[in-house]
Amino acid sequence: FWLKPPRAAPPPPRPSIPRERESRRSAAAASAMGFELPDAYGYVVLAHGLSWLSNTYLVINVVKARKKYDVQYPALYAPENHPNAEEFNCVQRAHQNTLENWAPVQLLMAFNGIVHPKFAATCGAIWAAGRIIYGYGYANKGPNGRMLGGLISHLGDFPLLIGCFVVATKMLKKA
């Protein structure tokens, strides 16, 4: 014999909180943490999304190059004696170089965005576009083909690096 316990009554409905009061509560909670993200911080998030699109483009290039040049996993690069080593390795190197720089650029963009969100987002978008041009040039024209994309990428990441020190100074003045 299995006896089922009686069902508990559902909890009473919670009183409705007006949206205005709810948003004030979340703003107060954010203030308790020490800072609020500016309204324009969504642009920073958008630029971060663009960086994912850039990375996806580069990943697709590597997948296609693996198939085209018959470079099997787990090899990251084609061996020196591979007939298409330079061609494949240029495609792979464009992606790898982007991965090496991606995390620092994203952190710089996030930190700058706390104080200067539109500046940070603009720099992040420039960097993301530069990475696509870098990858295209490197894959299609070899090592010399990466120069334009590298320059454009640096127009995005160098200002973020400088901006990081500007933001830190502003924050420390308030401390």
Image (cartoon, grey):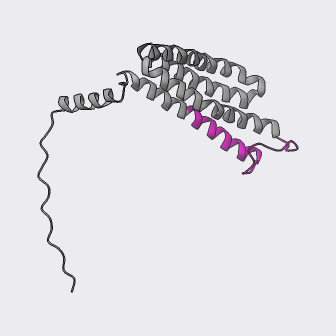
Left or right side of 63 for 50: left
Residue at 63% across / 29% down in the picture? Answer: 101
Q: Residue furthest bottom?
A: 1
Residue at 27% across / 32% down in the picture? Answer: 26
| Residue 126 at x, y percent in the picture | 56, 20
Numbered disc total: 0
Q: Nearer the viewer, residue 44 or 69?
A: 44
Q: Quadrant of residue 40?
A: top left
| Residue 112 at x, y percent in the picture | 49, 20
Magenta span contains residue 59: yes
Q: Residue furthest front?
A: 175
Q: Quadrant of residue 157?
A: top right
Q: In the picture, which quadrant includes the C terminus? A: top left
Residue at 76% across / 42% down in the picture? Answer: 77
Q: Nearer the viewer, residue 4 or 80?
A: 4
Q: Is residue 74 above or below residue 129?
A: below
Q: Is residue 133 above or below residue 100?
A: above
Left or right side of 159 for 71: right
Q: Nearer the viewer, residue 90 or 9?
A: 9
Left or right side of 87 for 132: left
Q: Is residue 9 above or below residue 72?
A: below
Magenta span contains residue 1: no
Q: In the picture, which quadrant includes the N terminus? A: bottom left
| Residue 28 at x, y percent in the picture | 27, 28
| Residue 109 at x, y percent in the picture | 51, 24
Left or right side of 14 for 59: right
Magenta residue span = 54-83
